Image (cartoon, rainbow, N blue to C red):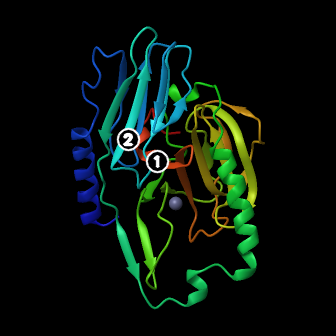
Amino acid sequence: MNRRGLLAAACLGLCAQAAAFAAVAAGEGYTLRGDCEQGAVVFGRTDPAASVSLDGRKLLLTTKGEFVFGFDRDAGPQAELRVKLPGHAELVKHYTVRKRAWEIQRIEGLPPKLVNPPPETEQRIVAEAKTITAAHQRDSAIDDFTQPFMWPASGRVSGVFGSQRILNGTPKQPHYGVDMAVPTGTPVHAPAGGIIALAEPDLYFTGGTIIVDHGHGLSSVVVHLSKLLVQPGDRVRRGQVIALSGMTGRATGPHVHWGVYWFGAHVDAQRLVQPMAPGNRP
Ligand SMILES: [Zn+2]
């Protein structure tokens, strides 16, 4: 990231504070922790016997009444939270999801074969996308998402969430994760505990790919891996080494890409961790 990018990121961090759910719902029987803005993950707590939904999706509650939801990169402008406490009328809250500014990079004059995958790969890409989507749709009643998250690898942050390239005038899929530049063969750790929902050694775009289901629809994906050390269904602990890094799939250099999803919503993994420091990194 250049200096301007760093300044913009610093500002986004500050502005994010302003969009936080400050004393939201004090005395209304639930609390929320997180930012009300695009890419944010929000952790809530209420009476375990309550019923909670966001934009019509009913949320699982842990035995302590914890729940989680996220706002996609392009979410908004409004979100609707409904909370029904036993013996009370349903609360219906509307929140404005703050827009974030994303880094956009335009590149012209590229040879077409670098911009679009060759047509013979289309079937494979569609089939793989279905498998990935299914893994993100799991709604498991496990509470690993309530743990503090950690960086899956230590390294220079070489790519941030939400940025987008426009190649020869065609907008490509935004970048839905955070990249850590690390040499091939670096251990990759589970950012939080969970169940392995997908472990594929060779997907077209992402190469060696693992999805960890942290419960309640929140999942992590780590990609471009050179070696997988887990299988679908495995139970993993926070910090467990689940793979070795690499540059498999469409990667231009060795790095770990970490993305976080709340069901189909792409959320900003970096918002779940503090800047890299001992204690929250491997
Ligand atoms: Zn990436």
Q: In whole angstroms, how far apart are the C-alphas of marks 2 and 1?
A: 15 Å
**Secondary structure found at label 2:** strand
Which numbered disc, 2 or 1, marks the residue closer to the eye? 2
Q: Is residue 120 above or below residue 145?
A: below
Label 1 CB-ligand 1 distance < 8 A: no
| Residue 18: x %, y % from top left | 21, 40
Q: Which mark is residue 140?
A: none
Q: To which residue does mark 1 refer?
A: 267
Name of the residue lying farthest toward the front: 89
Q: Residues within 10 Å of mark 2 (few under 14, many from 20)?
A: some
Q: State the mark number for residue 79.
A: 2
Q: Residue at x 75, y 54 (%)?
A: 200
Crowdedness near tag 1: few (<14), some (14–19) or many (≥20) residues, C-alpha within 10 Å: many
* Residue type indicated by callout 2: Ala
Q: Quadrant of residue 37?
A: top left
Instruction: Please name whichever residue, 182 or 76, is drawn nearer the observer in this view of the structure.
Output: 76
Q: Nearer the viewer, residue 104 or 189?
A: 104
Q: Which residue is drawn at 64% across and 35% down?
A: 240
Circle 1: residue type: Val
Please indicate, yes or no, whether residue 107 appears anywhere in the rendered image.
yes
